[in-house]
Amino acid sequence: MAKKHIVVDPITRIEGHLRIEAVIDENNTIVDAFSSSTMFRGIETILKGRDPRDAGLLAMRICGVCTGTHYQRSIEAVEDAFDITIPKNARIVRNLIQGALYMHDHLVHFYHLHALDFVDVVSALSADPKKTAEEARKWAGVAGVSPYTDGESEFKAIQDRVAKFVKQGRLGIFGNGYWGNKHYKLTPEQNLIGVAHYLQALDIQREMAKMQAIFGGKNPHPQSIVVGGVTCVQDIQNPARIALFKQLLQQSTKFVKQAYLPDVYMAGTMYADEATDSKATFSELIEGKGVGGTGGGLLNYMSYGDFRLDDTGFYNAKTLFPSGIVYGGDLSKVEPVNPEKIAEDVTHSWYEGDKPLHPYDGQTIPNYTGLDKREDGIAYLKTDEKYSWIKSPIYNDTRVEVGPLARMIVGVASKDERITKYVTNFLKRGNLPVSVLFSTVGRTAGRAIETELMADVMMEWVDELAANVASGDLSTWTEFDFDTVSVKTKGMGLAEAPRGSLGHWVRVENGKIVNYQAVVPSTWNAGPRDYKGRMGAYEASLIGTKVADAEQPLEIIRTIHSFDPCIACAVHVLDTKGKELGVYKLDSQCSI
Ligand code: NFE
Ligand code: MG
């Protein structure tokens, strides 16, 4: 049998437009894969000519999902350019706004964007509610907690709600799934737990969004951060606001520990054979011999580091997440990140350019070269040429993966005490080998571990903020001299976002921005092949995956979703004249 070409376009339950083309062999194993953004937008171009103090407000519009992240990175790039160190209160408040975003983003991702790749909603209808309650107690027990949803009647009520939908022939938001696919492995009872928590998480995510708004002013797009510090002076000094933040954090933490973590153990255990299907032992993996389980991919992991823990300056401070690179899944070594070694290549992207460029010299000149319309009526990607609006970031002439898993792996390889404790505890409680991390399931577990860590550390930070204010330190802003407008300067904001390493680079001359570039987490992960033909992280993660049913490529979606794609972030360039750059006819036969 000939090789088959699968087109999944659009990949749904993500932000933006992403297309995956995969080639499967006669055993339904993926032997080639291509990731393409079919969307063109833009922010970097608009920033040119603006006052650098306004950059954050404009750059923030790159995305409303990792909301406030681009705002902060942009402001940090300008602070770096003007050599400004922010006060302690501002540092902690920024950490709290970002930390709340991480919790919110990760929870929404797990339940509302990713869970249905593991959970078969229709199967939940045949669950026995009494057995479901027992099952929930079992997985909560693994996590060492009592279950969030405890009791037959609660599960029964949720099951009845879903049954009502189905009876009316209106699966609504659940309408377009691959229900019944044999790569769904949970029992009906486990599926019912997943569906119950999916619905409850809709309420909890709202509380997490409120946490961001307490100090951020609003959500999405907080507005209390300015070059030099923060403006939420009254909220910082008001014990009632601090108390409200703590109450929402406690409520959210309860759900994270008693629902999210047990559910990740449940899914991780049921899908564990996929996570470890390389059959490589851990020592082989750390010698770089294994390829990880399903979805492992590049096995090169990078983190710029983030969440400053002291006030010694943005690039001097100790960070909650260490910065570093781990190559080939080798946890015995971690190399420092050198910002000079970051470049973006456009060989396979619809832009002009003939060599990888450092972001300070980056260019964004569109050059759309079209699709390949074949006899079957489908327009395919011209994969030997240009095939995506996403650029290909390269670090030190290698392709790397970024994200929560990368942060956990770099943390463990750096022997960071706190991260190692959370990762080790997670694996120990679930009786899971470390090798489980190098897979699709591992990427999902990495995000859950990070959410638990963030929930705990934020309680420490909010207490630290209250204590600092009580000690009489009310400073929230560092004055700076903008007379330096006449000098040429440049700066970078290199830190992390929920989906991974995020950098903003700004050049300023005569008080105006002359070049602006952002290299974003989903750009690192979703980028197409580079000038040497090397795959990006999404592409590499699909190789070797077996697809149970080519008409329902559930496994492709599951692995791609494990990165939590955001294509709005990844492209972030636009034709300011609104010119039409290409017409696409989407083949939605394989979409979910
Ligand atoms: Ni639009 Fe984002 C995050 C950034 S992109 S969501 O997290 O930066 O990967
Ligand atoms: Mg960019």
Image (cartoon, rainbow, N blue to C red):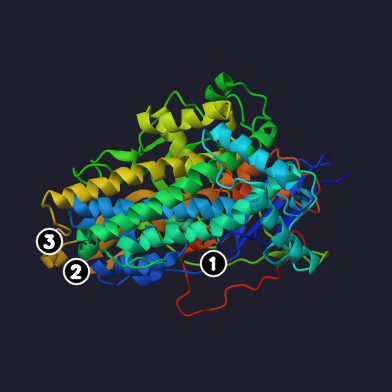
Quadrant placement of the C terminus: bottom right
Mark 3 or 2, nearer chain start:
3
Measured from the top left, where is residue 332 in percent x and y? 44, 23
Q: Quadrant of residue 361?
A: bottom left
Seen at 52% across and 33% down, the residue is 144
Q: 445 or 572: which is nearer to us? A: 445
Mark 1 or 3, nearer chain start:
1
Amino acid type of the residue that numbered disc 3 sits on in the rendered structure? Glu
Measured from the top left, where is residue 520 in percent x and y? 44, 54
Residue 527 shows up from this direction: no
Seen at 39% across and 69% down, the residue is 45
Discs 2/1, front: 2
Q: Is residue 208 above or below residue 377?
A: above
Instruction: Report the side of 85 relative to 457 (left or right).
Output: left
Amino acid type of the residue that numbered disc 2 sits on in the rendered structure? Asn
Seen at 72% across and 47% down, the residue is 129
Residue 96 shows up from this direction: yes
Discs 1/3, front: 3
* SS at mark 3 in the image: loop
Mark 1 → mark 3, Cα distance in angstroms:
43 Å
The answer to whether marks 2 and 1 mark residues whose Cβ atoms lie closer than 8 Å is: no
Discs 3/2, front: 3
- Residue 340 marker: none
The answer to whether marks 3 and 2 mark residues whose Cβ atoms lie closer than 8 Å is: no
In the picture of the structure, the residue carrying the numbered disc 3 is: 479
Q: Is residue 90 above or below residue 370?
A: above
Measured from the top left, where is residue 315 in percent x and y? 25, 44
In the picture of the structure, the residue carrying the numbered disc 1 is: 367
In the picture of the structure, the residue carrying the numbered disc 2 is: 510
Mark 2 or 1, nearer chain start:
1
Q: 564 or 454: which is nearer to us? A: 454
Instruction: Report the side of 241 relative to 386 (left or right).
Output: left
